[in-house]
Image (cartoon, rainbow, N blue to C red):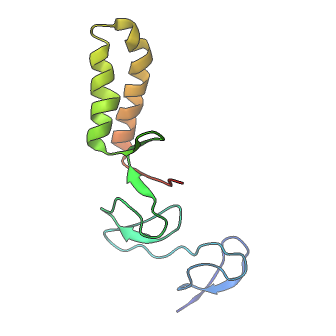
Amino acid sequence: MALINCKDCGNEISDSAGACPKCGAPVPRTIGEGETQCPHCMNIVDENATTCPGCRAIKGYMYDRRYGVGGKFAVITWAIIVPLALTIPFPIIGIITVPFALFAVYRLVTGPRWYQIQ
């Protein structure tokens, strides 16, 4: 157990503490192999986890407030294939849908993100 400085207030705290007792800032923890850190609550979770056990944040590729967080299949289907398929019979729709499809491809390439659902 070592003492570290809080990144927000500079107070000396234990590295095993969950948060700074003075200001309440979360303490970053050492991330091991096969683990990742939730950016919302700083809990260390398994690399393949889709839900954070601490704050219930959800890991996915895109978020829509009506449908929630979408995985790879949902993003490929609803943000790439369906809009581009609609451009064949209705070419004017392509002007609107192609930028969204490119954004979906970008999200698939960069990987999943954590979304805090309130």
Residue extending furthest toward the bottom: 1
> Is 42 above or below relative to 79?
below
In the foreground, 8 or 67: 67
Question: Which residue is depicted at the point 65% across and 79% down?
Answer: 20
- Whole-percent x, y for residue 36 in the image: 40, 66
Question: Which residue is depicted at the point 35% across and 33% down?
Answer: 105
The total number of labels drawn is 0
- Whole-percent x, y for residue 78 in the image: 32, 31
Residue extending furthest toward the front: 66
- Quarter of the figure with the C terminus: bottom right
For residue 116, side relative to residue 8 (left or right): left
Question: Which residue is depicted at the point 61% across and 78% down?
Answer: 19
For residue 61, side relative to residue 15 (left or right): left
Q: Quadrant of residue 25?
A: bottom right
In the foreground, 99 or 93: 93
In the foreground, 114 or 27: 114
Q: Quadrant of residue 91?
A: top left
Q: Quadrant of residue 31?
A: bottom left
- Whole-percent x, y for residue 64 in the image: 45, 39
- Whole-percent x, y for residue 111 in the image: 36, 47
> Is 68 above or below relative to 15?
above
